[in-house]
Image: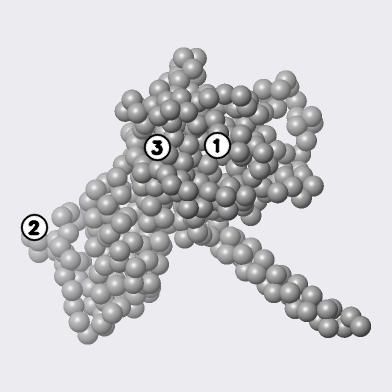
Amino acid sequence: MEERIIQMKKISDIATLFGSFDCNLHYLEAAFGVRISDRLDGENTALVIKGEGESLEKACDAIEHLKTAIEQGEELTEQRLHYTVSVALNGEYEQLLTMAGSDVLCLTVKGKPIKPKTAGQKKYTDEIKQNTVVLGVGPAGTGKTFLAVAMAVTALRQGQVSRLVLTRPAVEAGEKLGYLPGDLQSKIDPYLRPLYDALFEMLGPENYHRQMEKGTIEIAPLAYMRGRTLDDSFIILDEAQNTTPEQMKMFLTRLGVNSKAVVTGDITQTDLPGGQKSGLLEAIKVLDGVEDIAIHYFTERDVVRHKLVQRIILAYENYAHKTAVRSKKHYKVTAKRKP
């Protein structure tokens, strides 16, 4: 059995890495098939990892990455731990290096740093920096909208743009607008709530309302975008899978001088009535390969919500695949039976 030593700066960092009741320690040992212990010798604080061959190397890669994150003051969440282990087990060392190089996008009103938590999220934020239009496509919980809002707030704070415009289509998901109480604005607000929540976290309610009154921040339904030209703005279209092709084209052609647009959506959760074609789905096909436009695809590995969300997404994907295979077989059998 081989042995590796990883030096640690503080005993408290070891406690953070091991987790409550050593739950993280047990998870790491089981995942890589290694034994991990601490070595405390005066001021010399270290971890001792014992194992065999490739498993030992992968365990060290994961622990080195987690150690760096802890020393930088990052919170070691269950999702971060599981993602790091998954990446290391697959031998994707470059992804660990990418994550380690993630920059802080902005600070919340409470001073909490917001930064990409997966290699997929890091690539997404890099693409937003490098392109004028970015389409972020993927399942729920991958941070598509939240990271886009974080980058929009940063651009506003740094004076790169003078206005934030956030919009989404007001499409019902099983409930009609007319059944909701209040006037039109009251009926529309629930659809815009995720955007409010993200801005509240980054700006605080008072600052947010102050920026709204100044016109620096605008949140409105997509229908309100028609006929406008948005200059010097950072524009986010959320829930874009619920746009029609006409609406999507209308939105994309609102882009003005010194503006940037991010379009986010999940093509597996379309709520358009009557089997209408999604504008996001069409835009992916039409804009693929167009200069200064990037299309980024998230996967279930980029989900940063509860770990069960990853399993739910995978379960639905597997079900859809099996259903498609069964339908294809049924079609072939039926075709053969025809005279």
Task: Examine the image and state in which quarter residue 17 appears.
Answer: bottom left
Q: Earlier in the sequence, mark 3 or mark 1?
A: 3
Give the answer, above or below, for where 205 lies relative to 52.
above
The amino acid sitting under disc 2 is: Glu
Label 2: state its secondary structure.
loop
- Whether residue 140 sits left or right of residue 205 in the image: it is right
Single out the residue that lies furthest toward the right. 339
Counting from the top left corner in percent of width and height, residue 214 is at 46, 14
Which of discs 3 and 1 lies nearer the camera? The answer is 1
Q: Earlier in the sequence, mark 1 or mark 2?
A: 2
Residue placed most toward the observer, 13 or 281 = 281
| Residue at figure coordinates x 54%, y 44% from the top left | 264
The residue labelled by disc 3 is 151
Numbered badge on residue 43:
2
- Whether residue 242 sits left or right of residue 41 in the image: it is right
| Circles 3 and 1: CB atoms closer than 8 Å | no
Counting from the top left corner in percent of width and height, residue 89 is at 36, 72
Label 3: state its secondary structure.
helix
The amino acid sitting under disc 1 is: Leu
The amino acid sitting under disc 3 is: Met
Task: Assign the C terminus to one quadrant of the image.
Answer: bottom right
The residue labelled by disc 1 is 252
Numbered badge on residue 272:
none
Task: Examine the image and state in which quarter residue 29 appears.
Answer: bottom left
Residue placed most toward the observer, 32 or 291 = 291
Give the class, few, some or many, for how many residues have Cα within 10 Å of label 1's Cα (few <14, many ≥20). Answer: some
